[in-house]
Image (tube, rainbow, N blue to C red):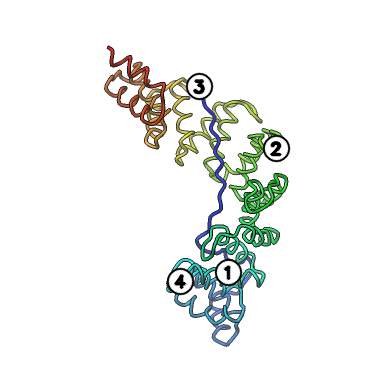
Amino acid sequence: MKRLIFFMLSLALISCPLAMAQEMPDAATLTQLSDGGDLVARDQLAERYYFGNGVKRDYKKAHDLSAKLADEGYPRSQMVMGSLYYNGHVVKKDPGKALEYFKSAANNGSSVGQLFLGLMYYNGEGTSPNKPEAYKYLKLAADEGHAEAQYQIGVMTQNGDGATKNIDEAIKYYRMAADQGHPTAQYSLGLIYGMGKDKAQDMKQAVKYYQLAANQGYPNAQYLLGLAYFFGEGLPKEPGQALKWFTMAAEQGDMDARYNLGVMYAKGEGVPKNAEQAKKWFTQGADQGDARCMYNLGYLYDTGELPQDEKEALKWYKLAIKNGNLEARDRVAELERQ
């Protein structure tokens, strides 16, 4: 089996801010206090209406409650207004205005505002891309304990993207996020230790973090955990566990897991040989454009592992060739000579 590992590290703006985690009165109490002129309660209530937390989601009410408060410096309302403009809810979508509201919230100490502002600077939304500014605000949020920001700082310092490349700093921030249950940070740590490129390879550490992410349903980690079990790297060799994790990843669309499952069933490696199961997984991989799966489907029809069918074999071999599998050329030439 060919082992393929892909870096899936990127910065992406989340569609809406995360609610600030702290105890608040219920919506009815907040409404009563807000109607009585309590501006803190009104600020909290605006956020409730934005998220539909304890009340029916209502962007218009969220806007009406937060518009004035945002101008008066209330960070929750600034986050609500920024999110409304970013997503185009009840106002015209305007990344520039969103940026200004997020900046105000960030400068008022909102770690979520710092996260969003950093991501907008990174992506150049509402402004020109500015990675040093992105790093500045993301690090503020990361140091306040925001897991997503910690992950993003890990990405930037690992890649030297807007920050000085520093693998130890990347590991530090990934680990902070991983300890809070951030699955992509867990997966990223697994890759660092598993690949041995920026840090000495340590498969025990790699599988520890693959396992954490895999348990949360992260398909790339499930696939790599399956590989570790299949080859016995960092843990005992257990084909049954490999099958389990490959299957979980494959069912979520992981192309490499589908290819490996097809190979296991086609060869009877760790499972009883089963051409129909091999066909199932190779077909799903082929439908995603995997030339290896196309070639193997052709081979199953060519060799009689499936009911022999020269027409089907040629079809899959030729598709494999179109997708870059040169090995299929010899099989096509052989079949066309017969």
Q: Earlier in the sequence, mark 3 or mark 1?
A: 1
Q: What numbered label is drawn on residue 56?
A: 4
**Nearest the camera: 207 or 164?**
164
Mark 3 or 4: the one toward you:
3
Could you tell me the amino acid type at mark 1?
Phe
Can you tell which quarter of the image residue 77 is in?
bottom right
Helix or strand or loop: what does disc 3 sit on? Answer: loop
Q: Earlier in the sequence, mark 3 or mark 2?
A: 2
Q: Earlier in the sequence, mark 1 or mark 2?
A: 1
Task: Report the quarter where the C terminus lies.
Answer: top left
Mark 4 or 1: the one toward you:
1
Residue at image mark 2: 199
Q: What numbered label is drawn on residue 269?
A: 3
* Residue 89 x/y as whole percent: 44, 70
Around disc 4, counting alpha carbons within 10 Å, would you say few (fewer than 14), some (14 to 19), or many (20 or more)?
few
* Residue 29 x/y as whole percent: 57, 79
Q: Are marks 3 and 2 in contact (CB under 8 Å)?
A: no
Gap in angstroms between the C-alphas marked 1 and 2: 36 Å
Residue at image mark 1: 102
Helix or strand or loop: what does disc 2 sit on? Answer: loop
In the rendered view, would you say 111 is above or below 276?
Answer: below
* Residue 215 x/y as whole percent: 58, 43
Around disc 2, counting alpha carbons within 10 Å, would you say few (fewer than 14), some (14 to 19), or many (20 or more)?
few
In the rendered view, would you say 21 is above or below 192?
Answer: below
Gap in angstroms between the C-alphas marked 3 and 1: 54 Å
Around disc 1, counting alpha carbons within 10 Å, would you say few (fewer than 14), some (14 to 19), or many (20 or more)?
many
Could you tell me the amino acid type at mark 3?
Glu
Q: Earlier in the sequence, mark 2 or mark 4?
A: 4
Helix or strand or loop: what does disc 4 sit on? Answer: loop
Mark 2 or 4: the one toward you:
2
